[in-house]
Amino acid sequence: MYLIQSFSSLVENNNTVLINTSKDLLHGLKILHNDKWYICGDLALNEGQSPHKLINSSPDDTDYQLLAKAALIVSQENLEQPICITTGFPYATYHIHKEKAINFFKRTHILDFDSSTYGTGGKKKNVLEVQQVEVIPEIVGCTIGIRRGELQATGSFFVLSCGFGTFESILSTDSGIIEQSMVSAHGIRYAVNIMINELKSKYYLEFRNAHQFDDAFQRGYVYLNRQNIDLREIRRNAIRTYYEDIVSPVLRNIITDKNLMKTNHIYLCGGAMYYQDLVECFREEFEGIAQLEVVENPETMASKGYALNSLRIAHGKKKSALGIDIGNATTIVTNFDDEEVKNY
């Protein structure tokens, strides 16, 4: 049903000649933007000196525009023009960035990229026409994915989403969402920074930023001064501190007695839900109170919801519908294959 592609949300200006450094386009993104060449995603991770991504960046920012172009480039071969796009932002920045994102996407895009990173084609120029754009809160995208995707969830339920940059919540009912239940707070980067601060007291960390340490945080180890440092205990404690300082206080205002009378079902989404230490914190707080369910492939739920929304505004034209989730850690692009898609 879905065609999903993802790449790291890291970018860096780079004019180096990079030939056959990657296996395909997705892993070899080198893009021309405002007359400068940038590497994105895995190529930035492997070849960059200090790749970066602004947290919750604006459509006016270079890194946002680069990642948006990268998303269009990797998906263009699977699309029929003109296309319909849905994307989103955390609830805290949604109203600020909505119109800017629509203005950026809704146009004819000239996409310049260098294919020599994965082959012999050299520089290429493609044209992609975007006809319609909708921008919705990221947590609403997750809700659409849960209701209209494989789960086909009905009734009322909470959705909690935790990514690198933000933690968000919502209460969804059959008649719509409860606006006062939509809250944004710090994401798992808060825990990554706790880990970095602890490591700083013992090791020289060079000039690595939180984005680069996020990879080590996921793996559970890192090499510092040629030593293999086990991070699992530090990670466990950092996640627990993050949950107690940030997540739990937010949820006390959302998952109240009044709202629990509407439902006690909670869906957990977002890439941070791969951390079992974090999921265990949720289970400890809500054991005997609520039914928790970690969705399958939790990091893709927002992008799936965006794609399903695009399918609606494209009037069921599967090849013209695209969902783009420009996350703080990962950019995820979703469109559809030729299988039947229901309930759009």
Image: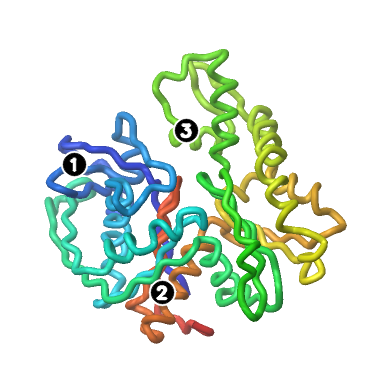
- Residue 235 placement (x, y as % from top left): 64, 32
> In what element is the residue under mark 2?
strand
The crowd level at tag 1 (other Cα within 10 Å; few <14, some 14-19, many 20+) is: some
The residue where tag 1 is placed is: 19
According to the picture, the residue beneath numbered tag 3 turns out to be 210
Q: Exactly how many numbered labels are in the figure?
A: 3
Local crowd at mark 3 within 10 Å, few (<14), some, or many (≥20)? some
Residue 24 in sight from this viewpoint: no
Colouring method of the image: rainbow
* Residue type at tag 3: Ala
Q: Residue at x 46, y 63 (%)?
A: 303
Residue 195: percent from left, percent from top: 58, 28
Q: Position of residue 156 (x, y in %)?
A: 71, 73
What is the spatial separation of the Cα atoms under label 1 and label 2, in whole angstroms? 31 Å
Q: CA distance from mark 1 to mark 3?
A: 29 Å
User: Can you tell which mark lies on residue 229?
Assistant: none
Is residue 137 shown above or below 194? below
Q: Is residue 88 visible?
A: yes
Element type at mark 1: loop
Question: In the depicted view, which residue is nearer to us: 172 or 305?
Answer: 172
Work out whether 294 lies above or below 276. below
Residue where numbered disc 2 is placed: 336
